[in-house]
Amino acid sequence: MAFLHVRRRRWRARPLGEAEAYARCHGERGNDVKLVRLPPRRPRYLAVLRTGEDLRRRFEERLDRRDNEANAR
């Protein structure tokens, strides 16, 4: 019969902050770790989305024509 090792959960008086959790898992943060804020993404334009939809439709039409030519042979 296999014995299961049951760990008892320890309750903390307060939750760990991000810095405390990082230090606990990875050790103290060195100078080689740096937080970087990225600029916001550019907004998507409806014209680009419409053009993409037109491109998809034309591609499907080309595939259909190719299938029709292959079936005609």
Image: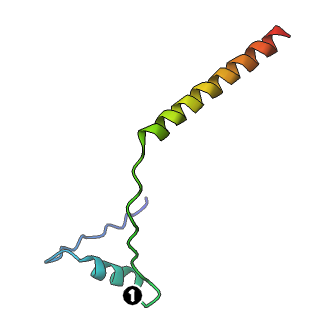
Give the vertical position of 46 relative to 63 (above or below). below
**What amino acid is at disc 1?**
Arg
Image point 59% across, 32% down: which residue?
A: 55
Q: Residue furthest left?
A: 13
Query: How many marks do you count on the picture?
Result: 1
- Residue 52, given in percent of the width and then of the height, sits at 53, 36
Res 28 → quadrant: bottom left
Q: Nearer the viewer, residue 59 or 5?
A: 59
Crowd rating for badge 1 (residues with CA inside 10 Å; few <14, some 14–19, many 20+): few
Specify whether 52 is left or right of 43.
right
- Residue 13, given in percent of the width and then of the height, sits at 13, 78
* Applied colour scheme: rainbow
Specify whether 36 is left or right of 57.
left
Mark 1 lies on a secondary structure that is: loop
Res 61 → quadrant: top right
Give the vertical position of 63 relative to 37 (above or below). above
Quadrant assignment for the C terminus = top right
Image point 39% across, 64% down: which residue?
A: 3
Q: Nearer the viewer, residue 40 or 72?
A: 40
